[in-house]
Amino acid sequence: MLPDFLQSNYRRYKDDTNSFATWLLEAAGKCGYQSHDLISPASTSKKNKNKSKKKASNDSDPVQYTATIKDLQLLADIVAKSALAVPRAVIVIVKRAIKLRRQVTAWFLGARGLGGQQATCPFYLCTGEDLPDAEEPLPTSEARGSDADLDLFLNRFAVLTVEEPLESLETQEGERKSSELQKIVKVELVENDEDEAERTLGLLFFKTYCLFHDLHNMRAFISQTWSEYRDKKIDLMNAALVTDSALQLARELVQEVMDDWSPYNMSHDENLQKVAFGVAAMSRGIDMTPSVEVGLPYNKRMSDVAEWCYVPTLTLLDAFSRVLENDHLPVVKKGHFGVYDPKANREGMSLGQKFNEDKILLLELLPEFCMIEAFGIRMITPDAITTGLHEFTKTKKVDTWLCFASQILLDVHHIMRHSTLGAFDDLRMSGLRIQRTIDEYLKVSKSHPPPKFWPKEGDEYIKDIRFTVESWIIGDPFLELRQRSRSLPGKITPEKHTLFSQHAILCGLTLFNLNVRMQDAGQQLVTQWYDVQQLAFLYNLTKSEFHSNLSWPDMETFIKIHGESHIFIGSRPKNASESLNRLELATGISSAARFARNSRDHNRKEFHRPDGKNPRVLTPTNTVSNLFHSQYIVGPGDSGKGIHAILDTLSQELCLNVTGQELTPSSLQKLSQQKWTKNHNVGTLQLLTLLKGRLFEEEPILLFNYFGMHKRSLELLRLIKAKEHHKFVQYFTASYMPDESFISNIVLLVLHVARGSAESARQMGLTSAGTGPIVSRIVKSCGDVMQEYLKKNGDVACKELRVFCRNKKPIYEEIPSDDKDPKYSYFSTIEDIMGPKALASLMTGISMA
């Protein structure tokens, strides 16, 4: 069931009904009508009794009442004959409910069934369709037309549930009348109470129609999302996460309606789609005989409803379930149902041609999901479609959600058919980038002694990421298992990466899994070495005192990602003394005890040991994408955060102000924030849109290469050490660095020398001689080394982001204006980032040796 803060069409319809009836009774009360003449106490329903048991049983429980539609008619006449105007908000909810009722029933029942369905809506009874556009008086019953429609309405009624709150013991205005204390809390539409079964069934059909309306809107939203990915407006991970979240919410919607249908015990051959489709065909007076002459499993005159009910995928899944056998793998010969042409124009195809194209794609892909159970394959990351189809291959049960999910899989494939860069191509290019990054890290790791502060498990975790890329993206475990099992006939040659090439959502979630794992490992690596953070202090000091034109875009991006207050423990320090104090706090190293007068004795080696305090740990600042960590990053101890908890956390952002560092929210996000603040609920698609926008903002944060920053920081520190080694020996003896794993602490030594120079100058009175600020030679020397090194290596990470990120706006802020041409940035850096061999492999499809 959907969480309370999310609204489906049916739930919003019921809320609108409640709001309208509430206003109507309150308006009648303002006109002098006594509600006790209209409303009589009603026995509490069983449902309300069950709810009341969950609450404290005391006198504060509300008293509930009922009223019929005929009573509402009287109230409407009272309000219409008065001078009371209809508020604009009431007009909005009335029109919205009428529009939903007409839209939903028109799709399924056509023009013949529309009028009768309109009659069940109390808004038609009390207001008619000719609603005022502004605050105007309500039309009377005489002005609404003949009594024929009214007689049709009176055979149905609505139940108004009202609440009588307790009187306040400390009221300043004295006792109020009971009619003034009454507050409507619920309105429930029911059919004629003389036939309880017919009434319940009518509500179920309307709720079912609302379900398919919700699924239709969600399908259009998902299609739009993948069109944005195809047009390079958002990234693959974003599209996949939003789609998988939508599919999980769709499952909740479907399950809620299926639970309501459960008392009717539909047979195995019946399901929700067949029932809704059959009723729609009967209401329209259309024969259900399939149009086999055009290759359709349904009547072509019912094609619109068939699309809404997902009859095409239902037919295909039903057919495939009949060939599934235990201990057997189904095999579909390529070309058996025809040849799929990705260059064909689907818009110009007939209904039969479209169905046959879907049949080719789906039936050739379904055997891949059978292999998961047959060989016990553990996927890299879970996704709703793969999980659902895997379960289908075991149970052979087809439900509405599975048909919807299968249709989404086909829709995404059709949207991407003309894309120059497919989802798997995107995944493969990113996989080669990750592979090269890890290879470079492992090569650097061999150039220094194994640090005691970096456990072996850390390198094993990083190697496991590389193994995942090697076995799943470079290789294909499904193909290897098929070849080893000899499950294919001799004349059939399986294709490589069949699942990935046709399952874009799985590609996106796999890429998200790999990038999050790279971010986790990279942040832990940089935290333990603390080399990038220490160089941030040296870079800041050098730039503020000597090299004002010193540019290090990668470092500026790193500081921007984690915030100045986290890196520098406040604002940026202005001198060597302040820098040293802040760095000691950040690293947990107290140099006051290490650099005493006897610092040259044998205890000198303890300088590098933290004094019990932990360094400031780098944590992910991509807060929204990090919500999905436990769901898609499978690891020991991961409990898995459900979609409800994720969206609940995301919804809290609607009531937060946007900080100065974040992008300006879109108009839709502002609208969602206003709605959340006012009603504390939000539409499903609005929340998914907010999710898509936040993931777009966080893309550069997730893709930032911490391994590359670590590698270049080590190279820069080694250059500084080589140039100033004699000075370090002079000031701190030859044992100033036990081994190269402590090379990052060179920055601490530089800051100590700089602070000492400044203190000596002050003691000698040089600062008051009018000679200007005292500068440190060693800091200037370090600045010279940095300036020379950063000319070629200062923006490597930013170049990488310009190639792989779709959100380039935050990156361009750190890049000189003459390098902002996206085409130039892409073509001039992709070979540098991936390497010539990886680029050739990507272009040819041949694995690297």
Image (tube, rainbow, N blue to C red):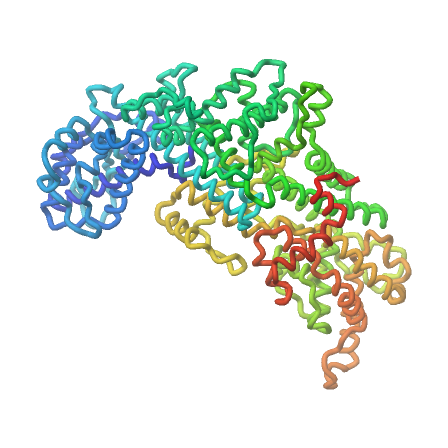
For the image shown, how many numbered marks are present on the structure? 0
Quarter holding the C terminus?
A: top right
Camera-side residue of 741 and 479: 479
Camera-side residue of 100 and 279: 279
Q: Is residue 777 above or below residue 264?
A: below
Say which residue appears at 79% left-offset and 65% top-offset: 750
Say which residue appears at 66% left-offset and 26% top-offset: 377
Task: Give the percent coordinates (x, y) of residue 466.
Answer: 73, 39
Residue 320 as seen in the image, left or right of residue 11 = right
Say which residue appears at 63% left-offset and 44% top-offset: 426
Camera-side residue of 229 and 239: 229
Task: Give the percent coordinates (x, y) of residue 162.
Answer: 23, 35
Q: Is residue 252 above or below residue 710?
A: above
Q: Residue furthest bottom?
A: 770
Q: Residue furthest front?
A: 293
Quarter of the image holding residue 479? Answer: top right
Task: Give the percent coordinates (x, y) of residue 625.
Answer: 56, 45
Task: Give the percent coordinates (x, y) of residue 494.
Answer: 67, 27
Whether residue 613 can be seen here: no
Quarter holding the N terminus?
A: top left
Residue 419 as seen in the image, left or right of residue 764 = left
Quarter of the image holding residue 28? Answer: top left
Q: Is residue 500 above or below residue 796?
A: above
Whether residue 111 can be seen here: yes
Quarter of the image holding residue 503? Answer: top right
Residue 744 as seen in the image, left or right of residue 729 = left
Camera-side residue of 410 and 4: 410
Say which residue appears at 15% left-offset and 43% top-offset: 29
Residue 70 as seen in the image, left or right of residue 399 = left
